[in-house]
Image (cartoon, rainbow, N blue to C red):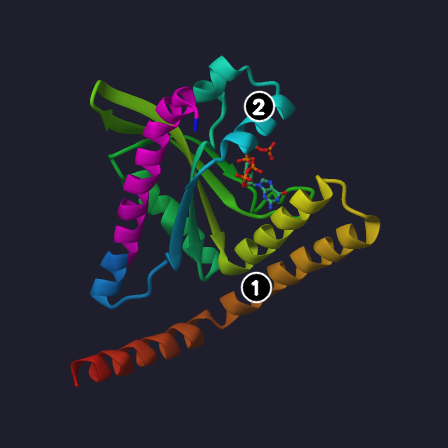
Amino acid sequence: MEKHWEFFLAPYKQAVEELKVKLKGMRAQFEMQGVHSPIEFVTGRVKPIASILDKAQKKNIPLDQLEQQMQDIAGLRMMCQFVDDIKTVVHLLRQRNDFTIVEERDYITQKKESGYRSYHVVIRYPVQMIYGEKNILVEIQIRTLAMNFWATIEHSLNYKYSGKFPEDIKQRLQRAAEAAYLLDEEMSKIRFEIQEAQAVFSRKQEVKDNE
Ligand code: 0O2
């Protein structure tokens, strides 16, 4: 990697690593208390240079404005079991004082035309570098497992077809988005049953682990 990119991306890398620890730590605290965790799992990535350049071109962002205008060079994803958990997670993020929220985008009540659903929170996160503090933008995407499944598949197809889907694929993706939505709805309706079963399962697991 060119030295210039290495320097530019260093605080983003640092931020992703730190935030993975912090957000996973939230899940661990729920587990420790033996209550349902609104967070199922957390992932994070720094956007590859090729994707940064692609997006900058598509959105007309000058390269010297990346820091100010590209919000997802550092990206975290928090996956939830239930749609209602998303609200809880957003609430938890709003309470924190290790970063400030600069923007929220709700693609759940207002899904994108593609069928994409997710809740985006853009934060300003301070990274301690050896030359001082650097504040960078980080995008946190919060979604259910069903939303994530759909987005992951659509993202790879998008890559394959460079965004120009054949009509039949487009229709299938829209039907799949609808199915993912219904799956979320059904799961929400039997949420109590599922959580009870999961609690029994984890108690049994604990007894087994202690044997
Ligand atoms: P990556 O890293 O490949 O995921 P825009 O790019 O115009 O849609 P903007 O303003 O950059 O939107 O920010 P926004 O709305 O928060 O969306 C950015 C990210 O949300 C995307 O990043 C995706 O991760 C996700 N996303 C948004 N729309 C869709 C969609 O229709 N399908 C899928 N699968 N994901 C979507 P990138 O830039 O695509 O990069």
Which contiguous range is marked in magenta?
A: 2-27
Residue 23 falls within the magenta-colored stretch: yes
Which label is found at residue 185? 1
* Type of secondary structure dominating the magenta stretch: helix
Which residue corresponds to the image point at 45% horizontal and 62% vertical from the top-left?
A: 81
Tell me the CA gap for discs 1 and 2.
37 Å
Which residue corresponds to the image point at 50% horizontal and 59% vertical from the top-left?
A: 145
Residue behind label 1 places its C-beta within 8 angstroms of ligand 1: no
Give the side of residue 133 with respect to residue 107, left or right. Answer: left
Q: Is residue 124 visible?
A: no
Quarter of the image where one finds residue 79: bottom left
Quarter of the image where one finds residue 173: bottom right
Quadrant of ligand 1 in image: top right
Q: Outermost residue, right direction? A: 167
Residue 4 placement (x, y as % from top left): 40, 19
Q: On the rendered image, what quadrant is the N terminus found in?
A: top left
Which residue is label 2 attached to?
56
